[in-house]
Image: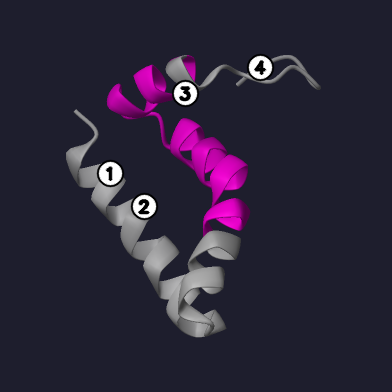
């Protein structure tokens, strides 16, 4: 997706996701899933529920990104 070590800006990733690029979607997941999980866990205090909420967030993103 980019030269090794270069971070792709979020706007570029979003444009790629909108164009149907699955690698870009995976890159967004890789960039934000851990932080979202930590945040969800801080609210829910349950690891499995936090993981489910992160998965739900990415499904919603995929459906509504436009």
Disc number for residue 58? 2
Earlier-in-chain disc, 2 versus 3 = 3
Distance from disc 4 to disc 3, alpha carbons, whole Å, reads 11 Å
Identify the residue under disc 1: 62
On the picture, is 9 further left or further right than 56? right
Distance from the alpha carbon under mark 1 to that under mark 2: 6 Å
Q: CA distance from mark 1 to mark 4?
A: 22 Å
Q: Element under label 2?
A: helix
- Examine the image and state in which quarter residue 2 appears: top right
Read off the residue under disc 3.
Answer: 13
Assess whether residue 59 is covered by the magenta stretch: no
Residue range of the region highlighted in magenta in the rendering? 12-36
* Side of 14 relative to 3 (left or right): left
The residue lying at 19 percent from left, 28 percent from top is 66
Looking at the rendered image, the disc whose residue lies closer to the viewer, 1 or 4, is 1
The picture places residue 61, in percent across and down from the top left corner, at 29, 44
Q: Earlier in the sequence, mark 4 or mark 3?
A: 4
Query: Crowding near pointer 2: few (<14 within 10 Å), some, many (20+)?
Result: some
Measured as percent of width and height from the top left, residue 42 is found at 56, 70
């Amino acid at each position: 997706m980019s030269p090794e070590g270069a971070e792709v800006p979020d706007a570029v990733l979003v444009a790629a996701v909108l164009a149907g690029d699955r690698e870009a979607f995976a890159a967004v997941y890789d960039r934000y899933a851990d932080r979202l999980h930590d945040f969800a866990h801080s609210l829910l205090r349950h690891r499995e529920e936090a993981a489910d909420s992160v998965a739900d967030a990415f499904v919603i993103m995929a459906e509504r990104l436009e």
